[in-house]
Image: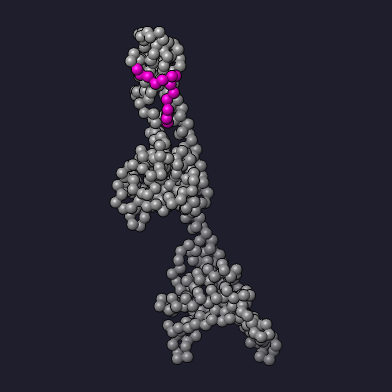
């Protein structure tokens, strides 16, 4: 502009664009006051096949009119400006594309390094916010009621009440989002499609589907502050491509985590088989040998009682190893469905409070014989006994026995629960005899 004013003898020069936000421009510099005015000279600036704006000159010195030579010179300058702007656009587009590609690669790498599902979504939201220069990066997912809810938010400030914000069923924008369509918004505060209570905090926004392999994971929303420039066509395209790649990375990360969980389950099964095939059989064989030795020793031999206690300890150990085998064979992330699994879940929960794992023994086919109507009161009793034991001082051992092999005095089949711990206040001599909780029910 300064060169045009100097070459033509104009006192004022200005550059105006047809769409200031198109290339991220927010203001235009002038050499003095902004023309056009009477007697001003204006020529268009073409960038490829579109009119980017106009170059204006006004107020020629000595109040002389602009000549044809001035206009021709201005057109030459406008053509050069158009070439320069076109090149700058290409450079900026290439730079933006490179930045988004690098950002997408970084997010993909982070997702495939073993993050949890919640951390993975937060990584996508934070990475997209930084790349888009947005005020926030949020991810919405479908609710059971048929709406969408913000489950993750990344903002420069405290997200406050953004997380948990819900787009209720029937919202105009919801049909597009659940259909996997991108939504571009010029002003969140005034767009009639926006109905959430946080819409007034934001201005231009884009809402992009996180969709891969026909699966809609959610929506990535990137709102800017009120009054910020709108997103350009290039930014919209790059952000849409980023969302597609991020969705694919989320699917791959989930598949990778599933494979890792499967590998863990396979290792647990292998360990369980080894325990059963090697350890339990050897313990059982040792117990049989001790029983045989006990029978030969005779009841008057001092070794008879010692051998009996050793056999009892081996049988108890076998029961505990079998319980451990059963626990190894259960998927830890799933709620147990068998009676034995439900008991073990309660004892596992108590171990975190006690600081050690309780010993659990099952006598008889408990999964087959204990019905659902008996399971609930038994677990309630067990839960209360474990809670009480965790509050008693000096507890270092806790034994749980569930027995379906001993009938009631009237001959009916029964299930018996016994919970013993070695804590308590002790007797007058200061010796603690522990505490036992017993419960039984007919089957």
- The quarter of the picture where residue 31 lies is top left
Residue 231 at x, y = what percent? 40, 36
Q: Residue at x 52, y 82 (%)?
A: 438
From the viewer's perspective, tell me whether residue 320 is left or right of residue 243: right
From this view, report whether residue 98 is shown above or below residue 294.
above
Q: Which residues are magenta?
A: 24-37
Residue 223 or residue 127, whichever sits in front: 223
The quarter of the image holding the C terminus is bottom left
Residue 110 or residue 365, whichever sits in front: 110
The quarter of the image holding the N terminus is top left
- The quarter of the picture where residue 69 lies is top left
Residue 284 at x, y = what percent? 59, 76
Residue 188 or residue 276, whichever sits in front: 188
Residue 44 in the magenta stretch? The answer is: no
- The quarter of the picture where residue 437 lies is bottom right
Residue 402 at x, y = what percent? 51, 79
Residue 202 at x, y = what percent? 40, 42
């Amino acid at each position: 502009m300064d060169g045009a004013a100097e070459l033509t003898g104009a006192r004022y020069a200005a550059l105006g664009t047809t769409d200031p936000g198109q290339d991220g421009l927010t203001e235009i510099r002038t050499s003095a006051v902004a023309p056009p005015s009477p007697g001003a000279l204006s020529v268009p600036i073409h960038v490829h096949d579109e009119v980017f704006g106009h170059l204006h000159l006004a107020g020629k010195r000595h109040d002389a009119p602009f000549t044809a030579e001035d206009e021709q010179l201005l057109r030459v300058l406008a053509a050069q400006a158009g070439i320069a702007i076109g090149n700058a656009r290409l450079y900026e587009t290439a730079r933006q594309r490179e930045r988004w590609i690098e950002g997408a690669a970084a997010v993909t790498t982070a997702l495939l390094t073993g993050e949890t599902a919640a951390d993975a979504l937060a990584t996508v939201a934070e990475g997209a916010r930084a790349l888009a220069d947005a005020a926030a990066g949020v991810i919405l997912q479908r609710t059971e009621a048929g709406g969408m809810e913000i489950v993750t938010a990344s903002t420069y400030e405290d997200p406050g009440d953004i997380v948990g914000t819900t787009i209720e069923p029937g919202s105009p924008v919801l049909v597009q989002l659940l259909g996997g369509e991108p939504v571009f918004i010029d002003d969140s505060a005034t767009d009639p499609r926006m109905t959430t209570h946080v819409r007034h905090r934001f201005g231009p926004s884009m809402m992009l589907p996180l969709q891969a392999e026909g699966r809609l994971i959610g929506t990535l929303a990137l709102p800017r502050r009120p009054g910020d420039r709108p997103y350009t066509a290039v930014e919209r395209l790059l952000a849409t491509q980023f969302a597609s790649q991020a969705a694919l990375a989320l699917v791959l990360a989930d598949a990778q985590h599933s494979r890792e969980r499967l590998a863990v389950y396979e290792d647990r099964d292998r360990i369980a088989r080894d325990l059963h095939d090697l350890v339990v059989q050897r313990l059982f064989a040792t117990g049989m040998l001790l029983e045989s030795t006990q029978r030969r020793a005779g009841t008057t031999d001092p070794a008879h009682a010692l051998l009996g206690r050793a056999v009892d300890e081996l049988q108890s150990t076998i029961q505990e190893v079998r319980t451990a085998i059963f626990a190894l064979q259960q998927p830890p992330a799933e709620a147990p469905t068998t009676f034995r699994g439900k008991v073990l879940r309660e004892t596992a929960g108590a171990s975190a409070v006690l600081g050690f794992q309780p010993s659990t023994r099952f006598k008889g086919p408990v999964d087959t014989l204990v019905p659902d109507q008996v399971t609930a009161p038994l677990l309630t009793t067990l839960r209360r006994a474990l809670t009480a034991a965790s509050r008693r001082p000096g507890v270092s051992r806790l034994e749980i026995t569930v027995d379906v092999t001993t009938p009631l005095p009237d001959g009916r089949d029964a299930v018996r629960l016994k919970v013993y711990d070695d804590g308590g206040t002790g007797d007058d001599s200061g010796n603690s005899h522990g505490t036992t909780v017993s419960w039984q029910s007919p089957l």
